[in-house]
Structures are given as structure tokens and as C-alpha cells.
Image (tube, coloured by chain):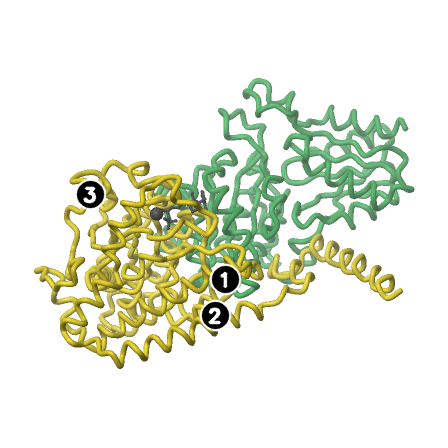
Amino acid sequence: MTTQRMTFAKAINTGLRKALEHDPKVMLMGEDIGALGGVFRVTDGLAKDFGGDRVVDTPLAESGIVGTAIGLALRGYRPVCEIQFDGFIFPAFDQITTQLSKMHYRSRGRLNLPVVIRVPYGGGIGAVEHHSESPEVLFAHTAGLRVVSPSDPQDAFTMIQQAIASPDPVMFFEPKGRYWEKGDVDTDADPLAAASTLDGARVLRSGTDVTLVAHGPTVATALKVADAAASEGRSVEVVDLRTISPLDTTAVAESVRRTGRCVVVHEAPVLYGTGAEVAARITEECFYHLEAPVLRVGGFHTPYPVAKLEHEYLPGLDRVLDAVDRVLAH
Amino acid sequence: MTTSGPLTDDGLVQLLTPTGERVDHPDYTPRVAHLDDEALRGLWRDMVLVRRFDTEATALQRQGELGLWAQCLGQEAAQVGSGRALAPQDYVFPSYREHGVAHTRGLDLTELLRLFRGVDHGGWDPTDVNFHLYTLVIGSHTLHATGYAMGVQRDGAVGTGDPGRDTAVVTYFGDGATAQGDVNEALVFAAVNNAPLVLFCQNNQWAISEPTTRQARVPLAARGPGFGVPSVRVDGNDVLACYAVTAEALERARSGGGPTLVEAFTYRMGAHTTSDDPSRYRSAAEEDYWRQRDPIDRLTTYLTATGALTDAFRAEVEAEADALGERTRTFVRALGRPETSTMFEHVYATPHAVVDAERAWFEQYEASFAGGEQR
Ligand SMILES: Cc1ncc(C[n+]2csc(CCOP(=O)(O)OP(=O)(O)O)c2C)c(N)n1
Ligand SMILES: [Mg+2]
């Protein structure tokens, strides 16, 4: 086992490199991912080592990127597309929802589209508009897509390789605000032999009083909340969803049956969000274990605000702690 | 006929006039020189069979056996001519009206009807005949074709000089589709990658009720050069000319010369689909004008004049068409309703907990009525 300390971005880079080495059909495509290494440097060095036919600087057209990736997949390739920023995925929305998601179904299983779409997402980086959004549920609402989001470098390293190996299309949401956070990554681990698959949530911190559900960028926030709550004598269990589609409510329900309380946190707007889905399912599955209504903490029903206001918009430590207090007050 | 704009007949490659006279073209005559009487009869037979099938499907829709049908009436020459220029290893990405191309790929035409009957979203295995499923979102598939062609390049199946290996990809789309972003992006991606792609636009002059003048102010082929893609306008009702220009474009693609835009200028003689009423937006005079330019008639005239089209052959094809019609009717009527549970199949290639749970719930729900029905 070789454990290295590396950033989240480097962990994905290392996972991509492994995938490129492992399977000659894997290829990366996107805007500025070659010589520049991507605007976040996630593909740093890969074009140099694997060449421009496998790490492709595409024309500046997102529908074209995803549409041609579909064609490449039909020819037997495994394209990994990088969308430069969350807010620029919409030109590709048609190809993703009407074509990518449905090809396996409409061909009655004859055609597979093993395409991964990497999306740096989320806020907190002081950016101009369209660079801080969290559109993951827009894709989770479409059958045929898997929608996942890692929350730490080890998981990022493992999950990107699992996503590339999947025969299904995978929307891979990368919390860009966490790109420079470091963690230990076992780079020898076989991603396909990993205990955690692309399908399941995981309990990151055990607790007894409240289940706090998060994914992607808010997982680190949730862990901080658990620390802060602990200092006040409250025991918070943190569940990292890891996947939005499928949604592993079995793991969440198992936790809530023990704690009796549940708070869901995400950066995306609360209205029709992941929290709404988790709350509905938890209410259905463990109604008699609940001591309090399931609460949601997330973005407001406004466009993503200006950078100077984003920390009031984002679900930070205080707002999540407040929700924890409220469920405990019941 | 206008002299400028997208509906002009300026610059159309033609080898067979509307009155069935064979004319020469310095660049394209050599492309059809090898087509002997048997090959020409073959093209005629293809067109006649496709038209019979198309007529039969329309009738089946009227009888309530199909939910919808999109006729290719009038576009047989563009489809059969281009389709017969393809090699087996070439790959086609059609839109939804390319029944003539499907026939040239060796797809049993009846297979197309599952989609229109409402029993399947596709209906055939595309890899059997290198003919992708129909795509109903206008223009989307042109990008799939471009990506597929980029894959062909990466496989080294271009420019080897081996006629059994070098591969071209062809995508079919309409005049309306040329306004879509995806078609324009396909031209950009194909151009910068020098992809082995033929973009075959059937300008049938109508996108439902909108004439091509609502999509462009220049002939559609004039768009190609701006993308760096060589373009050609061809008389889309001339099966020989369509064969010739496609053969040239395919050769360019297979040899590594990159993409070509072909505009086949034709006419949608029927309604857009069986749900449409063209009398609301176009004149009977216009329809008459184009009926005079029927793509099958001009080949019939020509081959009758040369003596290639014998009465015996015509009778043979007539019988074949009757049999196809009969087979089509039987096939469609025998297509039953799929099992309800198939709704949940193949949503994902690997298990998905939500789909699995919903399916399990639904099956148990359905089963709960089983006893009640007997009582
Ligand atoms: C993206 C999209 N918009 C609208 C439609 C509805 N629609 C179906 S066919 C059609 C006209 C297409 O015209 P054209 O591209 O010329 O092809 P044709 O039907 O003439 O073969 C329209 C508007 C659609 N299928 N897809
Ligand atoms: Mg049209």
C-alpha cells in the first residue's frame, strides 16, 4: 500500500492517469484540458504523457463535447468529458438528458454509453456569476444517469476510476471549493475491489443524537458541525451520500432509526432539492422513529448571489448548527 | 423556382434530367460509369420497394395500426442513391425519415415500424447493419456521427488504402436541422478533426410548415465553406447524381480527406407526418410541379428508353412489392403489446436501487389484483 498525501485535484488527476494507463479506450475531452491542464489543473500533465488524441482540447461547445463523446462511446471508447464550470453545462443539457441518458433504454440494452461527465461545482470561491452553482439534481431527475459526488481525496481517486469503469453514463460532480484540500490517498488500491461502490452512502462519523446528511462540498462542513456540536455535548452522526442517483436511503434510514433526528445539508437550493427527496423517503421509511421533522439547510430560491454575499447564501457552520439545535429542541 | 436564396436550382449536380435524359458532368459521370443495366435496375427496384413500403405504412397508420408515420415519399432517389454508395463497414446516423437508406443497409423495412407502432423506442440492433437508431431530436445525432467518425480515426480505419477497412460515417438530416446548434457544432468538430464524415442534408424544402427560406438566406451547401468543409449541391431527385456525389464524398472521408457537406435538393411530396395537413401552408400547384419531377418516374423513363427496364423485370418487382406489402401488414398486426414490466428494463446497464425498488413495488401492486380478477 502506497499512501500519499495529495490535494483533491491531484487525487482526481491520479485517478484519471490510472484509468488512461489501464484502458487504451479511455480518453479525456474538454476545453483547455491539454497544455493548460484544465482551468483547475485537474488534467495537469496528462496531455503531455498520453498525447492529444487521448487528452483532447475540444472546440468551445459543450453540446458538441457531449454529443461527440456519445459517438465515440458508440465506437467503443470511454470518454471522460470535462465541463469547465457548473454554470456552463447547460448547452450540453439536451445531449445529456435526451441522448446520453436514454440510449441504453431505447436500444433495449443493446447499446451502452460509458461516458463520464466531470463537473467542477459549488461555491465559496469568490467567483463571478455562473461559476458557483450546484445543478446536480437537474440530472438526478433524469433516469439513466448516475449522479455522484466525492467529498475527499481518497474517495475522489477511487470514484473517478469506478465512474470510468461503469457501463452507465456518470455525472461526476467535483466540489471545486475543496480542490486544494489535502488528504491521504492509497494510490495502489484497486478501485473496483473497493468496499464502497458508486452506489452507496457511508457513515463518516458515528453519533447518537442527530443524523446529518451531506454530499460533496458540504461534507467537510458537516464534519465541522459534528465537532462543534460535540463540544456542546451533542453527538452528531455524519452520513456522506456520495451518490444522488441512485440515492442510498437505506443507509440514511438505518442511521435515523438510531438517532431519531435528521438534517440534510447541501449548497443547491432547498426547493425540490436532494434534501426534499431524503426527507420524503425518511418520513416514509422511518416515520415512527422520528422525534422531529426532517430539516433541510441549503441555498435559497434565488440565483446564486454575488460573491460578497455568497457566505450568507451557502449553508455554513452556523446555519447547520442552528438546524441541529432545532431538531434537538423537539 | 427562384434564382437565388436557399430554393434556387443553381449549381445542382445532375446526371439525369427530370424528363429522363442522361446528361454528363465532367466530375461526376466517371462515378457512375461502372453502373451497368443490372445495377441501374437495382436502384429502380430499391426505390419502388421503398415507395410501396412507405405507402403501406401510411395506410396502416390510417387504419389505426400505427400511431404515426413519417413518409419519405419523393426522397427515394436521395436516400437510395446515397445509401447504395456505402460500403458495409460504413456507419449511418439517420434522423427519422431515412427508410430508403435503411433498406440499402439491409435492414428489413418492417423493423422500422416498431417505433411508430409504439412498442419500442428503437427496434433493431444498429450494429447488425451499421445503421443507428432513428433520432427524433432534430440534429442531435449529427454530433454522434461526428464522434463516431473521430473513433474511426482513432482506430486507424482511415487512409490505409484497404477498401475493406477504410470507413466513412454518414449522417442524414433535414433543411430545418441546419438551423440547430448541434448541426453547426457537428460541422465545427468534424472540420477541426478532419473526421471521415459525410453530412448529408436532404433539403426537402419544408420543415413541417416552414419553408427553407425560414432557415437560411443562402443555399444550404453554401454554409460548408465557412466551416472549411467542402460542399456540393445535388439534384436530390436524381438517383445517379446522388450516388455520384456521395461516392465522391465517401472516398474523400475514407482516404483521410475529411468531411463533406452534401445538400440534396429534393421535395417532401407527402405530409410531414400522418398528423400534418400541408394544405394549410403550401399550394397544390407547388405539389403538382414537384409531382412532375418524381424521382422514380425519371429513372423509369430513362431505363425504358435504354431498354434496361423490361416488362418481365417490372412484373417481378411488382410482385415483390406486393409481397412486401403483405408481409408488412402481417408483421405490424402481430406486434403485440410489450409486457408492462419491460418498462423497467435497461434503464441502467447495472442495477439501480431506485428503479429496482419501484419495479418490485409495481409488480407486487399488479399481483395484488390477480386474485380479485378471478373472483
Ligand atoms: C429539437 C426539436 N425541435 C422540434 C422538433 C419537432 N419537429 C419534428 S420534425 C420537425 C421539422 C424538421 O424539419 P427538417 O429538419 O427539414 O426535416 P424533415 O422533417 O423535413 O425531414 C420539427 C420542428 C423536434 N423533433 N426536435
Ligand atoms: Mg425538411
Q: How far across and how far down the image is residue A102, in percent?
A: 55, 54
Beta carbon at label 2 within 8 Å of ligand 1:
no
Identify the chain drawn in yellow: B
Q: What element carries label 3?
A: loop
For mark 1, give the secondary structure. Answer: helix
Q: Quadrant of the N terminus of chain B?
A: top left
Mark positioned earlier in the residue sequence (1 or 2): 1
| Residue B372 visible to an observer of this rendering | yes
* Ligand 2 has an atom within 8 Å of the beta carbon of the residue at disc 3: no
Q: In which quarter of the image is residue A2?
A: bottom right
Residue closest to the eye, B273 or B31: B273
In this picture, is A321 found above or below B253? above
Please name whichever residue, A298 or B233, is drawn nearer the observer in this view of the structure.
B233
Q: Earlier in the sequence, mark 3 or mark 2?
A: 3
In the image, which disc is placed on residue B328? 2
- Name above or below for residue A96 compared with residue A318: below
The residue at the point 56 percent across, 32 percent down is A133
Q: Which one of the lettered chains is coloured green? A: A
The residue at which mark 3 appears reads as B1
